[in-house]
Amino acid sequence: MNRLKDKVALITGGGMGIGREAAILFAEEGARVVVADIDPRAASETVDRVASAGGAAHAVVGDVAIEADVERMIAEGVGRFGALHVLYNNAGVLWKDRDRSVLETDERWWDRVIAINLKSVFWVTKHGIPHLRRAGGGSIVIMGSVSALVGFTRAQDAYTAAKGGLISLTKSLAVQFAGEGIRCNVIHPGIVDTPLQAPYLTEELRREFRTGIPLGRIARPREIAYAALFLASDESSFVTGAELVVDGGFTAG
């Protein structure tokens, strides 16, 4: 229960889904957690759940797509806990009704999806890495997607482009900062049963995934959080620039 003892972790999109599970799990493993979310109620609820489990967390509220908000949230978290060791870039959007094929997607939705899913990681690392340097090193965990690895007939081209960009950013950061003890890795989840996915997970689609995924089911949020925990912890001390696929065997088929 001490895999993140004495660590401070920032988790973006920590108000629900995988981010909330990661916040609770990281705290169970000894971390103090900065829960960043655009929804103050959701962030506060995550903090309350961490506290009820005996952990320490602090909510910071803002839009990860806006540099000034990210800079402020990181400063607030460091001000509360005194340091920063883990940047878990979990925040993202999945708007299947607005983000579709290149032939169908409006510019405003392209810009917003790219801003939240890709630009946000740029801002978090820009303002978070100086604190990791001061801590003597740390871990950056980025949330990618199997959408960056394979094509789908149900196109989400802004989302796919953003997640593909995160692979290149991961490798660049890994190489740039390895000499300072800062690691950077990306997780590629398959379909996960989260509030973000829930509006689209019809029973017909769930049946498709049960037959199309070798393990025969959709992932649970904590299963992705465990992958993030491994990459955040010193257990992955020789892992950087890596892509960890957590998809039930989907891309292996």
Image (cartoon, grey):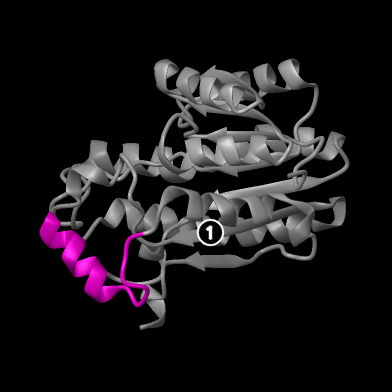
Q: Quadrant of residue 32?
A: top right
* Secondary structure mainly formed by the magenta segment: helix
Q: Would residue 152 appear left or right of 193 to someone viewing this image?
A: left
Q: Which residue is mark 1?
A: 187
Dot 1 falls on a residue whose secondary structure is: strand
Part of the protein shown in magenta:
203-218
Q: Is residue 174 magenta?
A: no
Which residue does the image show at 42% across and 59% down from the upper left? 145
Q: In the depicted view, which residue is nearer to us: 21 or 159?
A: 21
The quarter holding residue 153 reads bottom left
187 lies above or below 139 = below
Look at the image and tell me in which quarter the C terminus lies. Answer: bottom left
The answer to whether 198 appears left or right of 224 in the picture is left
Q: Quadrant of the N terminus?
A: top right
x and y percentages locating residue 95 in the rendered image:
24, 43
The three-letter code of the residue at mark 1 reads Ile
69 lies above or below 10: above
Q: Judge from the rendering whether residue 133 lies leftward or rightward of residue 114; answer left or right.
A: right
* Camera sees residue 163: yes
Viewer can see residue 123: no
The residue under the point 16% across, 61% down is: 205
Horizontal and vertical percent position of residue 108? 25, 36
Farthest-out residue, bottom = 253
Q: Position of residue 203 (x, y in %)?
A: 13, 56
- Please give the name of the residue rendered at 80% of the width and 22% of the height, measured from the top-left corner: 82
How busy is the neighbourhood of tag 1: few (under 14 within 10 Å), some, or many (20 plus)? many
> Does the magenta portion include 209?
yes
